[in-house]
Image: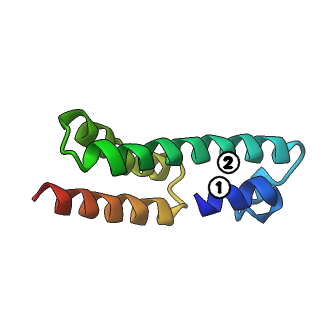
Amino acid sequence: MLVSLRMLAFPSALPEPWLRSGGGDVLVRAWAATWLALSAVLLVILFVSFRRAERWARLVMVTVPALWLVHFVLVPSTVYNLLLALITSCALAATLI
């Protein structure tokens, strides 16, 4: 969420130079707003439904590592997405044990 807020405030702070060209500021801010909304929804699910051990909440939380993995597959140079996928997968596996 902090990264999304930073992207909303300073869209030129992104590491990928192709996002900074042309009308990239609008795209970056839209992207940041989307990530912020997704993060907020996932936090609500995590702190309410997932803690109650509702079955559907586990299925929703499985999408988080899958999302990071898809981002890595689409842009293989973003190794940090693969790292985030592994971290969130381990965290999710630890909660299921």
Q: CA distance from mark 1 to mark 2?
A: 5 Å
Which residue is rendered at x = 18% and y = 44% of the image? 53
Image colouring: rainbow
- Mark 1 nearby-residue class (10 Å; few <14, some 14–19, many ≥20): many
Q: Which of pointers 1 and 2 lies earlier in the amino acid sequence?
A: 1
The residue sitting at the top extreme is 56
Residue receiving disc 2: 32
How far from the left and from the top, in percent, is residue 58? 24, 42
Residue appearing at x 19%, y 59% in the figure: 95
Q: Position of residue 4 (x, y in %)?
A: 65, 55
**Above or below for 30 versus 47:** above
**Closest to the observer: 24 or 50?**
50
Classify 81 as above or below 58.
below
Along the horizontal axis of the image, is 80 left or right of 7? left
Secondary structure of the residue carrying numbered label 2: helix
Q: Are marks 1 and 2 in contact (CB under 8 Å)?
A: yes
Query: Looking at the rendering, in which quadrant would you find the N terminus?
Result: bottom right
Mark 1: amino acid? Ser
Q: Pointer 2: residues within 10 angstroms few (<14), some, or many (20+)?
A: many
Q: Which residue is mark 1?
A: 4
